[in-house]
Image (cartoon, coloured by chain):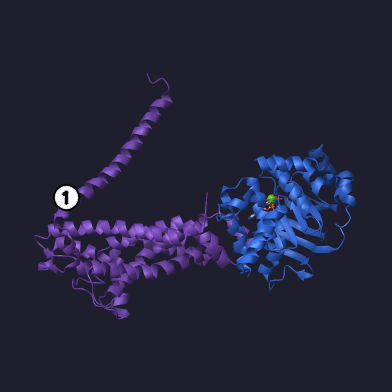
Chain colours: A blue, B purple
Amino acid sequence: MMHDTKKLLSCAVLPTSYTLSDIEQGAACCVPIPHIQVENLSVSYHGKSVLEGVSLDINKGCITALIGPSGCGKTSFLSTLNRLTDLIPGCHMQGRIHIDGADVTDPRLDVLALRRKVGMIFQKPNPFPLSIRRNIEMPLREHGLSQRSAIDERVERALRDVGLWEEVRDRLDAPALALSGGQQQRLCIARALALEPSILLMDEPCSALDPIASAVVEELIQRLRNRYTVVIVTHNLAQARRVANYAAFFWMTEHVGKLIEFGRCQSLFDSPSHDLTAAYVTGISG
Amino acid sequence: MLKNPYRLSDLLMTITVWFSAALVVGAFFWLLSDLALHGIAKLNWSCLVSAPENAGRDGGIGPILVSTLLILGVALLMTIPLGLGTAVYLSEYSSGALARSIRMSLDVLAGVPSIVFGLFGNALFCIWLGLGFSILSGGLTLACMMLPIFIRSTEAGLTAVATEWRHGAAALGLTQAAALWHVLLPAAAPAITAGLMLSIGRALAETAALIFTSGYVDRMPDSLSDSGRALSVHIYDLSMNVTGGDQSAYGAALVLIVLLVVINNVAASLADRFLSQRITTS
Ligand SMILES: Nc1ncnc2c1ncn2[C@@H]1O[C@H](COP(=O)(O)OP(=O)(O)O)[C@@H](O)[C@H]1O
Ligand SMILES: [Mg+2]
């Protein structure tokens, strides 16, 4: 807790990294190189369509926020990008998704390699019931890393990346489930980062956390910019504004989710081109 | 005095709950002390290792213990791998008609009287497969009886494991085998152990199915293809067919209970060793 408070204070004195103008001018990020290209994507569960006709390009090294009311298909959209939809009974997707030029929807695709490249963070922190160290080490070993020193180094680097190292370095063998919610979520991020992905999908990563832990994770997400392509679902519009370069607004029409508007975060919030977006953005934030 | 009606109902509830619990514990201890009182006189070390004499009225139960353990061993060797495999198939791989029909067959099988398993085992293992009255036939027949219980309980344990872990493992690019081995099976260990204990209990208590498959012979078995008499069969025989065998029957029954407790503890600690200890919860 002590640590969390300190973290919060430390990010409070760094307000510049939160301002929109800074993000907009942000030099290195937002080179408009499409990393994920989605074309006419539809998702259905047991034949019932929940998301239709989504097309957008997600740029490399940028943070793209997905906003919209519950049930409009944000989680479903995210799960198509790493083919987690394969695990959901009755789930079917249509359309084309290209990541680094490779077709994600191709049935012959090496899904394990794809998922290694596209990490995912869930709404509810889900560390395995293993020790803190084993949570990171086990996936590394499964992906073929076996050298003790290399593993230890990666574990430490991943934990440092998420600012957890100082907090847990003395108890790496303690159960991960004994950590606080915020620490668990950062461990999950570390676990994903240890595999050196290029894309991170985050499904409401802060919504199960208290405000302080949430601020810590948010600050962490900021630091991921440039190094990773981040797609984040959030119900916190202020957070979307603070962290994202791009924003996509989803809305449900006749029980089917649609992408209503997509663009630079600033323009989507400040001068939305669609009435629905304007209503949603002002309705909740104002 | 009891102004609040809820207090009266709470009181009644408390009494009922305590009474039920006491009744169950009491019945168990009555049974146990009855067994101990009658049986303990008969028990000593030599009786555990020596052969029965005079149709079991005298002598010991050495060969019978060995047969019992061998039959149980054969049954467990079949049940554990087959059961784990089927349970994993049911919970992780299939959701269609095949799984539904497997589940239904298992539930029916779990309720089939053991005498039916005895006749089936006799027809299949003893006659058709030519194994004759043997420890092997008995163990395989027991495995058929244990599998439904073990599979259903393991499957329930696996299904109860949070989907979050399943999705988390998949999202890290882990194979299904890795997810099962490192996370899902260890997390389901308590249910697997419980299933194992229930099936061991069913196996050790079994008489009808064994009479037709592993037989009556109370000599020390030389191999798995020898006939061997299980403890429960011995107890049944002593109390039903041998006049003056009651004392010995009590002794054997006491051994059976102790054996059950010991084996259950060993099974629990093995499951703990191989499954639970690999995970660390708070
Ligand atoms: N596993 C599932 N089976 C059936 N329907 C689902 C499943 N997951 C989500 N849905 C439905 O799909 C729609 C979109 O859900 P979801 O993608 O979770 O939306 P969001 O994340 O935006 O709240 C909802 O109507 C939901 O009921
Ligand atoms: Mg969602």
Q: Position of residue B62 (x, y in %)?
A: 20, 67
Query: Where is A104 relative to B10, above or below?
Result: below
* Towards the viewer: A216 or A150: A150
Q: Residue at x 14, y 60 (%)?
A: B248
Q: Residue at x 77, y 56 (%)?
A: A230
Foreground of the two, B208 or A164: A164
The N terminus of chain B: image quadrant: top left
Residue B17 in sight in this render: yes
Chain letter of the residue beneath label 1 in the structure image: B
Residue A273: tell me if it is visible: no
Q: Residue at x 86, y 63 (%)?
A: A33
- Residue B118 coordinates in the image, percent (x, y): 28, 68
Q: Tell whether circle 1 marks a residue whose Cβ is less than 8 angstroms from ligand 1.
A: no
Up-down relation of residue B163 to residue B140 (above or below)? above
Q: Residue furthest bottom?
A: B130
**Toward which corner of the image does residue A55 lie, by quadrant?**
bottom right
Residues B151 and B194: in front is B194
Residue at image mark 1: B37
Q: Residues within 10 Å of mark 1 (few under 14, many from 20)?
A: some
Q: Where's residue A116, x and y in %? A: 68, 65
Number of on-image labels: 1
Q: Secondary structure at mark 1?
A: helix
Which residue is rendered at x = 16% and y = 50% of the image? B37
Residue A83 left/right relative to B234 = right
**A206 in relation to A146, above or below:** above
Image quadrant in which you'd find residue A210:
top right
The one of A94 and A3 positioned closer to us in this rendering: A3
For this view, does B25 lie left or right of residue A125? left
Amino acid at the residue labelled 1: Leu
Q: Is residue A62 left or right of residue A202?
A: right
Quarter assignment of residue A83: bottom right
Furthest residue toward top: B1
